[in-house]
Amino acid sequence: MSKKETIPLYKKVIDDLKTLIDKGTYKKGELLPSENDLCKTYSTTRVTVRQALTGLMSMGYITRRHGKGSIVSEPKQGLGILSLSGVTAGVGDQTLTTAILQKQAKQSWPLDFFHELNKEELRNGCVFFSRLRHINGTPVLYEETFITNINLPRFTSRNLENCSLFKILKEHYNIEVKEGEQKIWAIHGDKNISKLLDIKTNHPIVHMKRRLQTNINNLNIYSLVYCNTTEYFLQDYF
Amino acid sequence: MSKKETIPLYKKVIDDLKTLIDKGTYKKGELLPSENDLCKTYSTTRVTVRQALTGLMSMGYITRRHGKGSIVSEPKQGLGILSLSGVTAGVGDQTLTTAILQKQAKQSWPLDFFHELNKEELRNGCVFFSRLRHINGTPVLYEETFITNINLPRFTSRNLENCSLFKILKEHYNIEVKEGEQKIWAIHGDKNISKLLDIKTNHPIVHMKRRLQTNINNLNIYSLVYCNTTEYFLQDYF
DNA sequence: AAAAACAACTTGTATATACAAGATAAATAT
DNA sequence: ATATTTATCTTGTATATACAAGTTGTTTTT
Protein backbone atom coordinates (compact mmCIF):
# COMPACT_ATOMS: atom_id res chain seq x y z
CA MET A 1 0.00 0.00 0.00
CA SER A 2 2.59 2.52 1.09
CA LYS A 3 4.64 3.53 -1.90
CA LYS A 4 8.18 2.75 -0.82
CA GLU A 5 9.42 4.92 -3.67
CA THR A 6 12.94 6.16 -3.19
CA ILE A 7 13.05 9.72 -4.43
CA PRO A 8 16.15 10.56 -6.42
CA LEU A 9 18.85 12.49 -4.62
CA TYR A 10 18.78 15.43 -7.00
CA LYS A 11 15.06 15.82 -6.40
CA LYS A 12 15.63 15.83 -2.67
CA VAL A 13 18.21 18.59 -3.12
CA ILE A 14 15.68 20.56 -5.19
CA ASP A 15 12.95 20.10 -2.61
CA ASP A 16 15.24 21.04 0.27
CA LEU A 17 16.56 24.19 -1.37
CA LYS A 18 13.09 25.17 -2.59
CA THR A 19 11.76 24.83 0.95
CA LEU A 20 14.61 26.92 2.35
CA ILE A 21 14.03 29.60 -0.28
CA ASP A 22 10.26 29.62 0.32
CA LYS A 23 10.84 29.74 4.09
CA GLY A 24 13.14 32.72 3.63
CA THR A 25 16.26 31.04 4.98
CA TYR A 26 17.90 32.00 1.70
CA LYS A 27 16.59 35.41 0.76
CA LYS A 28 16.30 37.10 -2.62
CA GLY A 29 19.68 38.18 -3.93
CA GLU A 30 21.64 35.97 -1.57
CA LEU A 31 23.91 33.15 -2.66
CA LEU A 32 23.11 29.50 -2.12
CA PRO A 33 25.89 27.30 -0.73
CA SER A 34 28.46 26.59 -3.43
CA GLU A 35 28.19 23.44 -5.50
CA ASN A 36 31.08 21.88 -3.60
CA ASP A 37 29.47 22.70 -0.26
CA LEU A 38 26.25 21.05 -1.41
CA CYS A 39 28.30 18.05 -2.55
CA LYS A 40 29.63 17.65 0.97
CA THR A 41 26.21 18.17 2.56
CA TYR A 42 24.61 15.49 0.45
CA SER A 43 27.68 13.28 0.04
CA THR A 44 27.42 13.41 -3.71
CA THR A 45 29.18 14.85 -6.73
CA ARG A 46 28.83 18.04 -8.71
CA VAL A 47 26.98 16.38 -11.57
CA THR A 48 24.10 15.53 -9.26
CA VAL A 49 24.18 18.87 -7.46
CA ARG A 50 24.24 20.70 -10.78
CA GLN A 51 21.27 18.65 -11.95
CA ALA A 52 19.37 19.99 -8.97
CA LEU A 53 20.53 23.57 -9.51
CA THR A 54 19.65 23.40 -13.20
CA GLY A 55 16.17 22.31 -12.17
CA LEU A 56 15.84 25.17 -9.70
CA MET A 57 17.03 27.56 -12.38
CA SER A 58 14.49 26.43 -14.97
CA MET A 59 11.85 26.71 -12.26
CA GLY A 60 12.88 30.31 -11.76
CA TYR A 61 14.08 29.90 -8.19
CA ILE A 62 17.67 30.90 -8.86
CA THR A 63 19.95 32.42 -11.43
CA ARG A 64 23.59 31.46 -11.73
CA ARG A 65 26.68 33.51 -12.37
CA HIS A 66 29.89 31.99 -13.64
CA GLY A 67 32.55 32.33 -10.98
CA LYS A 68 30.11 33.77 -8.49
CA GLY A 69 27.42 31.34 -7.44
CA SER A 70 23.72 30.59 -7.44
CA ILE A 71 21.66 33.67 -6.69
CA VAL A 72 18.20 33.38 -5.18
CA SER A 73 15.54 34.98 -7.38
CA GLU A 74 12.26 36.53 -6.52
CA PRO A 75 10.25 33.76 -4.92
CA LYS A 76 7.85 32.51 -7.57
CA GLN A 77 4.62 30.81 -6.73
CA GLY A 78 3.00 28.49 -9.15
CA LEU A 79 3.60 28.01 -12.81
CA GLY A 80 2.76 30.44 -15.52
CA ILE A 81 -0.09 32.70 -14.61
CA LEU A 82 -1.19 31.32 -11.31
CA SER A 83 -0.23 34.08 -9.00
CA LEU A 84 -2.18 37.21 -8.45
CA SER A 85 -0.44 40.32 -7.23
CA GLY A 86 -1.73 43.57 -5.87
CA VAL A 87 -0.31 46.81 -7.12
CA THR A 88 1.20 47.64 -3.78
CA ALA A 89 2.43 44.33 -2.49
CA GLY A 90 2.83 40.65 -3.22
CA VAL A 91 0.21 38.03 -2.53
CA GLY A 92 1.86 37.27 0.80
CA ASP A 93 0.62 40.46 2.38
CA GLN A 94 -2.88 40.11 0.99
CA THR A 95 -5.71 38.11 2.40
CA LEU A 96 -6.45 35.59 -0.29
CA THR A 97 -9.51 33.43 0.19
CA THR A 98 -11.00 30.90 -2.15
CA ALA A 99 -14.61 29.92 -2.31
CA ILE A 100 -15.63 26.68 -3.97
CA LEU A 101 -18.71 27.44 -6.04
CA GLN A 102 -19.10 23.97 -7.41
CA LYS A 103 -17.35 21.15 -5.61
CA GLN A 104 -15.31 18.79 -7.72
CA ALA A 105 -17.47 16.09 -9.24
CA LYS A 106 -17.14 13.54 -11.98
CA GLN A 107 -19.02 14.35 -15.18
CA SER A 108 -18.67 14.04 -18.92
CA TRP A 109 -16.91 16.71 -20.96
CA PRO A 110 -19.05 19.64 -22.10
CA LEU A 111 -20.20 19.23 -25.69
CA ASP A 112 -18.69 22.56 -26.74
CA PHE A 113 -15.44 22.10 -24.83
CA PHE A 114 -12.83 24.69 -25.71
CA HIS A 115 -10.00 22.29 -26.38
CA GLU A 116 -9.54 19.24 -28.51
CA LEU A 117 -9.67 16.00 -26.53
CA ASN A 118 -8.23 12.66 -27.47
CA LYS A 119 -10.16 9.38 -27.39
CA GLU A 120 -8.74 8.36 -24.04
CA GLU A 121 -9.77 11.64 -22.43
CA LEU A 122 -13.27 11.48 -23.90
CA ARG A 123 -13.69 7.94 -22.64
CA ASN A 124 -12.53 8.83 -19.13
CA GLY A 125 -14.69 11.91 -18.71
CA CYS A 126 -13.60 14.64 -16.36
CA VAL A 127 -13.73 16.08 -12.88
CA PHE A 128 -15.11 19.60 -12.83
CA PHE A 129 -15.06 22.30 -10.21
CA SER A 130 -15.26 26.07 -10.06
CA ARG A 131 -13.70 28.48 -7.64
CA LEU A 132 -13.97 32.17 -6.89
CA ARG A 133 -10.93 33.82 -5.38
CA HIS A 134 -11.16 36.91 -3.22
CA ILE A 135 -8.43 39.30 -2.21
CA ASN A 136 -9.17 41.24 0.95
CA GLY A 137 -12.81 40.24 0.61
CA THR A 138 -13.26 41.40 -2.99
CA PRO A 139 -13.94 38.78 -5.66
CA VAL A 140 -11.13 39.01 -8.19
CA LEU A 141 -10.76 35.75 -10.08
CA TYR A 142 -13.24 33.15 -11.20
CA GLU A 143 -11.92 29.85 -12.43
CA GLU A 144 -13.53 26.77 -13.92
CA THR A 145 -11.32 23.72 -13.94
CA PHE A 146 -11.63 20.45 -15.81
CA ILE A 147 -9.33 17.56 -14.98
CA THR A 148 -9.26 14.35 -16.96
CA ASN A 149 -10.86 11.69 -14.76
CA ILE A 150 -8.27 9.03 -14.11
CA ASN A 151 -9.77 7.86 -10.80
CA LEU A 152 -7.51 9.58 -8.33
CA PRO A 153 -8.40 7.96 -4.99
CA ARG A 154 -10.46 10.27 -2.79
CA PHE A 155 -9.80 13.25 -5.07
CA THR A 156 -13.43 14.28 -5.23
CA SER A 157 -13.60 14.54 -1.47
CA ARG A 158 -10.57 16.75 -0.97
CA ASN A 159 -10.67 20.40 -0.03
CA LEU A 160 -9.49 22.52 -2.91
CA GLU A 161 -9.47 25.89 -1.20
CA ASN A 162 -6.42 28.11 -0.91
CA CYS A 163 -4.81 27.42 -4.27
CA SER A 164 -3.85 23.97 -3.12
CA LEU A 165 -4.76 22.01 -6.25
CA PHE A 166 -1.19 21.68 -7.44
CA LYS A 167 0.06 20.92 -3.95
CA ILE A 168 -2.51 18.15 -3.54
CA LEU A 169 -1.70 16.64 -6.90
CA LYS A 170 2.01 16.69 -6.10
CA GLU A 171 1.88 15.43 -2.54
CA HIS A 172 -0.86 12.84 -2.74
CA TYR A 173 -0.55 11.57 -6.28
CA ASN A 174 2.97 12.61 -7.30
CA ILE A 175 1.52 14.49 -10.24
CA GLU A 176 3.43 17.46 -11.57
CA VAL A 177 2.68 19.95 -14.31
CA LYS A 178 5.18 19.53 -17.10
CA GLU A 179 4.18 22.11 -19.67
CA GLY A 180 1.24 24.14 -20.74
CA GLU A 181 -0.26 26.76 -22.94
CA GLN A 182 -2.58 29.63 -22.29
CA LYS A 183 -4.55 31.94 -24.46
CA ILE A 184 -5.42 35.41 -23.32
CA TRP A 185 -8.15 37.85 -24.24
CA ALA A 186 -9.54 41.07 -22.86
CA ILE A 187 -13.32 40.88 -22.84
CA HIS A 188 -16.41 42.43 -21.36
CA GLY A 189 -17.83 40.01 -18.84
CA ASP A 190 -21.25 38.57 -19.52
CA LYS A 191 -24.04 38.78 -16.97
CA ASN A 192 -22.94 35.74 -14.98
CA ILE A 193 -19.26 36.61 -14.78
CA SER A 194 -19.97 40.24 -14.00
CA LYS A 195 -22.25 39.20 -11.18
CA LEU A 196 -19.70 36.78 -9.77
CA LEU A 197 -16.91 39.36 -9.89
CA ASP A 198 -19.26 42.12 -8.71
CA ILE A 199 -18.55 44.47 -11.62
CA LYS A 200 -20.53 46.34 -14.25
CA THR A 201 -21.18 44.48 -17.48
CA ASN A 202 -18.99 46.74 -19.60
CA HIS A 203 -16.02 46.36 -17.29
CA PRO A 204 -12.92 44.93 -19.01
CA ILE A 205 -11.70 41.61 -17.64
CA VAL A 206 -8.90 39.24 -18.53
CA HIS A 207 -10.08 35.92 -19.91
CA MET A 208 -7.78 32.95 -20.24
CA LYS A 209 -8.08 29.44 -21.55
CA ARG A 210 -5.38 27.21 -20.21
CA ARG A 211 -4.20 23.70 -20.73
CA LEU A 212 -1.63 22.10 -18.46
CA GLN A 213 0.00 18.79 -19.26
CA THR A 214 1.19 16.62 -16.39
CA ASN A 215 3.72 13.85 -16.02
CA ILE A 216 0.83 11.38 -16.27
CA ASN A 217 -0.18 10.47 -19.78
CA ASN A 218 -3.68 11.67 -20.72
CA LEU A 219 -3.96 13.65 -17.49
CA ASN A 220 -4.47 17.26 -18.53
CA ILE A 221 -5.80 20.15 -16.54
CA TYR A 222 -7.97 22.58 -18.45
CA SER A 223 -9.22 25.82 -17.01
CA LEU A 224 -11.19 28.89 -17.90
CA VAL A 225 -10.15 31.99 -16.01
CA TYR A 226 -11.91 35.33 -15.64
CA CYS A 227 -10.08 38.04 -13.75
CA ASN A 228 -10.96 41.56 -12.69
CA THR A 229 -7.71 43.50 -13.00
CA THR A 230 -8.95 46.83 -11.72
CA GLU A 231 -7.09 46.70 -8.45
CA TYR A 232 -4.83 43.71 -9.03
CA PHE A 233 -3.04 42.20 -11.98
CA LEU A 234 -1.98 38.84 -13.25
CA GLN A 235 1.68 38.11 -13.02
CA ASP A 236 3.77 35.66 -14.92
CA TYR A 237 7.37 34.62 -14.53
CA PHE A 238 9.36 32.60 -16.98
CA MET B 1 38.10 41.63 -34.18
CA SER B 2 36.58 38.29 -35.14
CA LYS B 3 35.43 36.56 -32.00
CA LYS B 4 37.29 33.29 -32.07
CA GLU B 5 34.92 32.03 -29.39
CA THR B 6 34.62 28.28 -29.29
CA ILE B 7 31.01 27.47 -28.65
CA PRO B 8 30.47 24.63 -26.20
CA LEU B 9 29.60 21.27 -27.70
CA TYR B 10 26.28 20.96 -25.88
CA LYS B 11 25.22 24.33 -27.30
CA LYS B 12 26.10 23.17 -30.79
CA VAL B 13 23.93 20.10 -30.25
CA ILE B 14 21.08 22.34 -29.09
CA ASP B 15 21.43 24.64 -32.08
CA ASP B 16 21.63 21.76 -34.54
CA LEU B 17 18.58 19.97 -33.19
CA LYS B 18 16.66 23.22 -32.87
CA THR B 19 17.39 24.01 -36.51
CA LEU B 20 16.32 20.54 -37.60
CA ILE B 21 13.09 20.85 -35.63
CA ASP B 22 12.35 24.31 -36.99
CA LYS B 23 13.14 23.14 -40.52
CA GLY B 24 10.72 20.25 -40.08
CA THR B 25 13.27 17.49 -40.47
CA TYR B 26 12.05 16.22 -37.12
CA LYS B 27 8.32 16.75 -37.02
CA LYS B 28 5.95 17.12 -34.10
CA GLY B 29 5.40 13.82 -32.30
CA GLU B 30 8.43 12.16 -33.83
CA LEU B 31 11.40 10.89 -31.86
CA LEU B 32 14.81 12.49 -31.97
CA PRO B 33 17.81 10.18 -32.39
CA SER B 34 18.51 8.34 -29.15
CA GLU B 35 21.04 9.72 -26.71
CA ASN B 36 23.55 7.07 -27.68
CA ASP B 37 23.08 7.86 -31.38
CA LEU B 38 23.72 11.53 -30.65
CA CYS B 39 26.79 10.52 -28.66
CA LYS B 40 28.19 8.78 -31.72
CA THR B 41 27.27 11.64 -34.04
CA TYR B 42 29.04 14.21 -31.91
CA SER B 43 31.75 11.90 -30.52
CA THR B 44 30.80 12.72 -26.97
CA THR B 45 29.19 11.15 -23.93
CA ARG B 46 25.68 11.01 -22.59
CA VAL B 47 26.27 13.64 -19.93
CA THR B 48 26.91 16.23 -22.63
CA VAL B 49 24.10 15.02 -24.89
CA ARG B 50 21.69 15.03 -21.97
CA GLN B 51 22.75 18.58 -21.10
CA ALA B 52 21.67 19.57 -24.59
CA LEU B 53 18.39 17.63 -24.40
CA THR B 54 17.61 19.12 -20.99
CA GLY B 55 18.10 22.54 -22.53
CA LEU B 56 15.80 21.74 -25.43
CA MET B 57 13.25 20.42 -22.99
CA SER B 58 13.23 23.54 -20.82
CA MET B 59 12.92 25.57 -24.04
CA GLY B 60 9.81 23.57 -24.86
CA TYR B 61 11.20 21.99 -28.00
CA ILE B 62 10.89 18.41 -26.80
CA THR B 63 9.43 16.26 -24.09
CA ARG B 64 11.09 13.09 -22.91
CA ARG B 65 9.67 9.71 -22.00
CA HIS B 66 11.55 7.24 -19.88
CA GLY B 67 12.40 4.20 -21.93
CA LYS B 68 10.98 5.75 -25.08
CA GLY B 69 12.93 8.75 -26.26
CA SER B 70 12.83 12.49 -26.89
CA ILE B 71 9.59 13.54 -28.52
CA VAL B 72 9.42 16.69 -30.63
CA SER B 73 6.84 19.14 -29.27
CA GLU B 74 4.73 21.73 -30.98
CA PRO B 75 7.22 24.20 -32.40
CA LYS B 76 7.19 27.18 -30.09
CA GLN B 77 8.06 30.63 -31.27
CA GLY B 78 9.53 33.10 -28.91
CA LEU B 79 9.52 33.14 -25.17
CA GLY B 80 6.53 33.85 -23.01
CA ILE B 81 3.90 35.95 -24.68
CA LEU B 82 5.56 36.89 -27.90
CA SER B 83 3.39 35.12 -30.36
CA LEU B 84 0.06 36.23 -31.58
CA SER B 85 -2.40 33.69 -32.88
CA GLY B 86 -5.57 34.01 -34.81
CA VAL B 87 -8.63 32.06 -33.82
CA THR B 88 -8.52 29.96 -36.90
CA ALA B 89 -4.85 29.34 -37.46
CA GLY B 90 -1.34 29.89 -36.22
CA VAL B 91 0.73 32.92 -37.01
CA GLY B 92 2.34 31.13 -39.90
CA ASP B 93 -0.74 31.36 -42.10
CA GLN B 94 -1.44 34.99 -41.28
CA THR B 95 0.05 38.02 -42.89
CA LEU B 96 1.89 39.69 -40.09
CA THR B 97 3.35 43.09 -40.80
CA THR B 98 5.10 45.41 -38.43
CA ALA B 99 5.21 49.18 -38.73
CA ILE B 100 7.86 51.11 -36.86
CA LEU B 101 6.15 54.16 -35.40
CA GLN B 102 9.20 55.54 -33.71
CA LYS B 103 12.55 54.26 -34.88
CA GLN B 104 14.94 53.12 -32.19
CA ALA B 105 16.85 56.04 -30.70
CA LYS B 106 18.96 56.66 -27.66
CA GLN B 107 17.31 58.67 -24.93
CA SER B 108 17.13 58.88 -21.17
CA TRP B 109 14.63 56.81 -19.23
CA PRO B 110 11.16 58.33 -18.77
CA LEU B 111 10.77 59.96 -15.37
CA ASP B 112 7.72 57.86 -14.52
CA PHE B 113 9.14 54.60 -15.86
CA PHE B 114 7.08 51.59 -14.89
CA HIS B 115 9.89 49.51 -13.50
CA GLU B 116 12.62 50.04 -10.96
CA LEU B 117 16.02 50.68 -12.56
CA ASN B 118 19.41 50.19 -11.02
CA LYS B 119 22.17 52.82 -11.00
CA GLU B 120 23.96 51.27 -13.95
CA GLU B 121 20.82 51.28 -16.07
CA LEU B 122 19.99 54.87 -15.16
CA ARG B 123 23.52 55.96 -16.04
CA ASN B 124 23.43 54.20 -19.40
CA GLY B 125 20.08 55.53 -20.52
CA CYS B 126 18.01 53.53 -22.98
CA VAL B 127 17.14 52.88 -26.57
CA PHE B 128 13.45 53.38 -27.26
CA PHE B 129 11.25 52.36 -30.14
CA SER B 130 7.60 51.67 -30.76
CA ARG B 131 5.98 49.29 -33.18
CA LEU B 132 2.50 48.57 -34.39
CA ARG B 133 1.81 45.07 -35.60
CA HIS B 134 -0.89 44.28 -38.13
CA ILE B 135 -2.43 40.96 -38.96
CA ASN B 136 -3.99 40.81 -42.41
CA GLY B 137 -3.86 44.59 -42.53
CA THR B 138 -5.64 45.21 -39.22
CA PRO B 139 -3.67 46.82 -36.38
CA VAL B 140 -3.67 44.36 -33.49
CA LEU B 141 -0.75 45.01 -31.18
CA TYR B 142 1.03 48.19 -30.18
CA GLU B 143 4.31 47.84 -28.36
CA GLU B 144 6.71 50.31 -26.78
CA THR B 145 10.12 48.89 -26.07
CA PHE B 146 12.93 50.20 -23.89
CA ILE B 147 16.33 48.54 -24.01
CA THR B 148 19.15 49.48 -21.68
CA ASN B 149 21.70 51.37 -23.76
CA ILE B 150 24.92 49.40 -23.70
CA ASN B 151 26.22 50.70 -27.04
CA LEU B 152 25.43 47.82 -29.31
CA PRO B 153 27.29 48.63 -32.52
CA ARG B 154 24.97 49.82 -35.28
CA PHE B 155 21.90 48.77 -33.30
CA THR B 156 20.09 52.06 -33.81
CA SER B 157 20.38 51.72 -37.57
CA ARG B 158 18.97 48.21 -37.86
CA ASN B 159 15.58 47.32 -39.25
CA LEU B 160 13.36 46.02 -36.49
CA GLU B 161 10.38 44.98 -38.56
CA ASN B 162 8.95 41.49 -38.65
CA CYS B 163 9.44 40.54 -35.02
CA SER B 164 13.16 40.25 -35.56
CA LEU B 165 14.35 41.99 -32.40
CA PHE B 166 15.28 38.78 -30.64
CA LYS B 167 16.79 37.30 -33.76
CA ILE B 168 18.96 40.38 -34.26
CA LEU B 169 20.08 40.37 -30.65
CA LYS B 170 20.96 36.70 -30.85
CA GLU B 171 22.68 36.66 -34.20
CA HIS B 172 24.57 39.94 -34.14
CA TYR B 173 25.32 40.40 -30.46
CA ASN B 174 24.92 36.89 -29.04
CA ILE B 175 22.33 38.21 -26.61
CA GLU B 176 19.67 35.83 -25.37
CA VAL B 177 16.70 36.33 -23.09
CA LYS B 178 17.23 34.37 -19.90
CA GLU B 179 14.13 35.06 -17.86
CA GLY B 180 11.38 37.55 -17.52
CA GLU B 181 8.20 38.66 -15.88
CA GLN B 182 5.03 40.15 -17.19
CA LYS B 183 2.05 41.76 -15.63
CA ILE B 184 -1.31 41.62 -17.32
CA TRP B 185 -4.38 43.79 -17.16
CA ALA B 186 -7.59 44.17 -19.11
CA ILE B 187 -8.24 47.87 -19.71
CA HIS B 188 -10.18 50.27 -21.83
CA GLY B 189 -7.74 51.90 -24.21
CA ASP B 190 -7.21 55.63 -23.91
CA LYS B 191 -7.65 57.96 -26.88
CA ASN B 192 -4.16 57.36 -28.29
CA ILE B 193 -4.16 53.59 -28.01
CA SER B 194 -7.69 53.31 -29.35
CA LYS B 195 -6.75 55.41 -32.33
CA LEU B 196 -3.64 53.35 -33.02
CA LEU B 197 -5.53 50.06 -32.78
CA ASP B 198 -8.52 51.53 -34.63
CA ILE B 199 -11.08 50.64 -31.97
CA LYS B 200 -13.72 52.42 -29.91
CA THR B 201 -12.57 53.89 -26.61
CA ASN B 202 -14.58 51.49 -24.46
CA HIS B 203 -13.22 48.45 -26.23
CA PRO B 204 -11.43 46.00 -23.89
CA ILE B 205 -7.76 45.47 -24.64
CA VAL B 206 -5.00 43.46 -23.03
CA HIS B 207 -2.30 45.56 -21.46
CA MET B 208 1.03 44.08 -20.43
CA LYS B 209 4.14 45.38 -18.76
CA ARG B 210 7.09 43.14 -19.42
CA ARG B 211 10.65 42.89 -18.31
CA LEU B 212 13.08 40.49 -19.96
CA GLN B 213 16.50 39.82 -18.52
CA THR B 214 19.29 38.80 -20.88
CA ASN B 215 22.55 36.97 -20.51
CA ILE B 216 24.27 40.37 -20.44
CA ASN B 217 24.41 41.99 -17.06
CA ASN B 218 22.37 45.19 -16.82
CA LEU B 219 20.86 44.59 -20.26
CA ASN B 220 17.14 44.38 -19.75
CA ILE B 221 14.35 44.73 -22.26
CA TYR B 222 11.25 46.49 -20.99
CA SER B 223 8.08 46.76 -22.97
CA LEU B 224 4.56 48.06 -22.76
CA VAL B 225 2.09 46.09 -24.84
CA TYR B 226 -1.46 46.93 -25.87
CA CYS B 227 -3.37 44.29 -27.76
CA ASN B 228 -6.78 44.16 -29.37
CA THR B 229 -7.97 40.61 -28.80
CA THR B 230 -11.26 40.84 -30.66
CA GLU B 231 -10.19 38.68 -33.55
CA TYR B 232 -6.91 37.28 -32.27
CA PHE B 233 -5.54 36.26 -28.92
CA LEU B 234 -2.27 36.21 -27.08
CA GLN B 235 -0.72 32.83 -26.65
CA ASP B 236 1.82 31.62 -24.17
CA TYR B 237 3.67 28.34 -23.91
CA PHE B 238 5.70 27.20 -20.95
C1' DA C 1 49.74 54.69 -3.96
C1' DA C 2 48.65 52.33 -8.08
C1' DA C 3 49.14 48.52 -11.14
C1' DA C 4 50.09 43.80 -11.99
C1' DA C 5 50.41 39.15 -10.66
C1' DC C 6 48.80 35.56 -7.97
C1' DA C 7 45.98 32.41 -5.16
C1' DA C 8 41.76 30.68 -3.95
C1' DC C 9 37.45 30.55 -4.55
C1' DT C 10 33.36 30.03 -7.76
C1' DT C 11 30.67 27.89 -11.90
C1' DG C 12 31.15 25.96 -16.89
C1' DT C 13 32.27 22.18 -19.83
C1' DA C 14 33.55 17.58 -20.64
C1' DT C 15 35.02 12.47 -20.39
C1' DA C 16 34.23 7.78 -18.86
C1' DT C 17 31.61 4.66 -16.59
C1' DA C 18 27.89 2.02 -14.08
C1' DC C 19 23.57 0.37 -12.88
C1' DA C 20 18.35 1.16 -12.47
C1' DA C 21 14.13 1.25 -14.73
C1' DG C 22 10.61 2.02 -18.49
C1' DA C 23 9.22 0.38 -23.31
C1' DT C 24 8.93 -2.95 -26.88
C1' DA C 25 9.23 -6.78 -29.63
C1' DA C 26 10.85 -11.44 -30.10
C1' DA C 27 11.33 -15.95 -28.08
C1' DT C 28 9.50 -19.21 -25.00
C1' DA C 29 6.31 -21.67 -22.11
C1' DT C 30 1.63 -22.64 -20.97
C1' DA D 1 -3.63 -19.07 -29.41
C1' DT D 2 -2.37 -16.80 -25.24
C1' DA D 3 0.39 -15.61 -21.53
C1' DT D 4 5.03 -15.20 -19.84
C1' DT D 5 9.66 -14.55 -20.05
C1' DT D 6 13.63 -12.66 -22.05
C1' DA D 7 16.59 -9.69 -24.68
C1' DT D 8 17.42 -5.32 -26.14
C1' DC D 9 16.36 -1.12 -26.92
C1' DT D 10 15.43 3.45 -24.53
C1' DT D 11 16.02 7.24 -20.73
C1' DG D 12 16.95 8.09 -15.53
C1' DT D 13 20.19 8.46 -11.83
C1' DA D 14 24.70 8.54 -10.05
C1' DT D 15 29.94 8.45 -9.14
C1' DA D 16 34.57 10.15 -10.02
C1' DT D 17 37.44 13.09 -12.25
C1' DA D 18 39.67 16.91 -15.01
C1' DC D 19 40.51 21.23 -16.78
C1' DA D 20 38.66 25.92 -18.43
C1' DA D 21 37.19 30.22 -17.10
C1' DG D 22 34.87 34.02 -14.34
C1' DT D 23 35.28 36.54 -9.65
C1' DT D 24 37.43 38.34 -5.80
C1' DG D 25 40.63 39.47 -2.48
C1' DT D 26 45.61 39.31 -1.38
C1' DT D 27 50.28 39.77 -2.43
C1' DT D 28 53.84 41.44 -5.03
C1' DT D 29 55.86 44.55 -8.10
C1' DT D 30 56.30 48.96 -10.09
Image: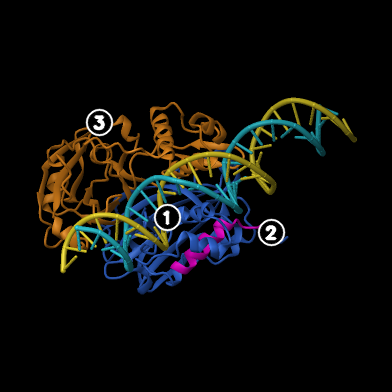
Chain colours: A blue, B orange, C yellow, D cyan
> Taking A179 as reference, is B148 left or right?
left
User: What residue did someone put label 3 on?
Assistant: B95
* Residue A94 locus on image (x, y percent): 35, 73
* Amino acid at circle 3: Thr
The amino acid type of the residue labelled 1 equals: Met
Write down the residue under mark 1.
A57
The Cα atoms of the two marked residues, 3 and 2, are separated by: 54 Å
Q: Chain of mark 1?
A: A
Of marks 1 and 2, the one in the foreground: 1
C-alpha distance separating marks 1 and 2:
29 Å
> What percent of the width, then of the height, locates residue C3?
19, 57
Looking at the picture, how far across and down is residue A74, in whole percent?
36, 63
Give the SS element for disc 3. Answer: loop
Residue type, numbered disc 2: Lys
Marked residue chain, label 2 = A
Judging from the image, mark 3 belongs to the subunit labelled: B
Q: Residues within 10 Å of mark 2 (few under 14, many from 20)?
A: few
Mark 1 packing: few (<14 Cα in 10 Å), some, or many (20+)?
some
C-beta proximity under 8 Å, tags 3 and 1: no
| Position in image of residue D4 (x %, y %) | 82, 39
- Circle 3/circle 2 CB separation < 8 Å: no
Evaluate whether label 3 is on the same chain as label 1.
no
State which region is magenta: A4-21
Q: Which residue is mark 2?
A: A3
Q: Earlier in the sequence, mark 1 or mark 2?
A: 2
Q: In the picture shown, does residue B138 fall above or below A181?
A: above
Q: Quadrant for residue D23, please give it.
A: bottom left
